Amino acid sequence: MPTPVTAIYPGTFDPITNGHTDLIHRATRLFSRVIVAVAANPGKDPMFSAAERVELARLVFADVEKVEVVGFNNLLVDFAAQQNAGVILRGLRAVSDFEFEFQLAGMNRKLAPALETLFMVPAEPYAYLSSKIVREIASLGGNVADFVHPKVKAALADRLALKS
Ligand code: ADP
């Protein structure tokens, strides 16, 4: 039996998309526990509050026992240690993701040498998907049904109705 390893998947998840979900499902086949760690990230001026982003991700993974969704606002490597995570999981879509992810992984390794960063690639239909694109499509009245969970779609519609 391999040693059980907890992976932590940090991000803003503003909101969680089918690209994130695809990665998380893949990770459940590799790790004993997957923690979706929702960063408060106030600097990004998110559309949804941290509590709302946690709530939406919890709705999406309500039936998946291995997946736990938690919010955090401290240093990722400290939060990973608190959660006993051995792996930081990040997604790579295009080459354009690489430079930032490479810098982040290098810095996290400097801060916590025992914590490994692993990258996963989503299924092809999600390779061009980002939370930002989903927010933009929804705010211009486009249909995001293929990109997010129905409950996330409803939350986007509610948020945008409130704004207009
Ligand atoms: P952050 O602000 O940390 O980039 P995001 O929620 O945008 O937060 O992304 C979290 C992680 O998920 C990042 O590693 C990002 O590259 C990855 N990711 C985002 N969208 C997708 C997708 N469609 N497919 C695979 N990985 C993705």
Image (cartoon, rainbow, N blue to C red):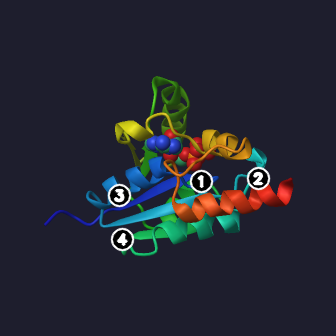
Q: What is the crowding at mark 1: few (fewer than 14 residues within 10 Å), some, or many (at least 20)?
A: many
Q: Position of residue 128 (x, y in %)?
A: 49, 34
Where is mark 1, residue-wise? 13
Q: Residue at x 57, y 54 (%)?
A: 76
For marks 3 and 2, the one nearer the N-term is 3
Where is mark 3, residue-wise? 25
**Identity of the amino acid at label 3?**
His
Instruction: State the residue in front, 60 or 105.
Output: 60
Q: Residue at x 42, y 49 (%)?
A: 89
For marks 4 and 2, the one nearer the N-term is 2
Does the numbered disc 1 mark a residue whose Cβ is under 8 Å from ligand 1?
A: yes
C-alpha distance separating marks 1 and 4: 19 Å
Q: What is the crowding at mark 3: few (fewer than 14 residues within 10 Å), some, or many (at least 20)?
A: some
* Discs 4/3, front: 3
Where is mark 4, residue-wise? 66
Q: Position of residue 35 (x, y in %)?
A: 46, 64
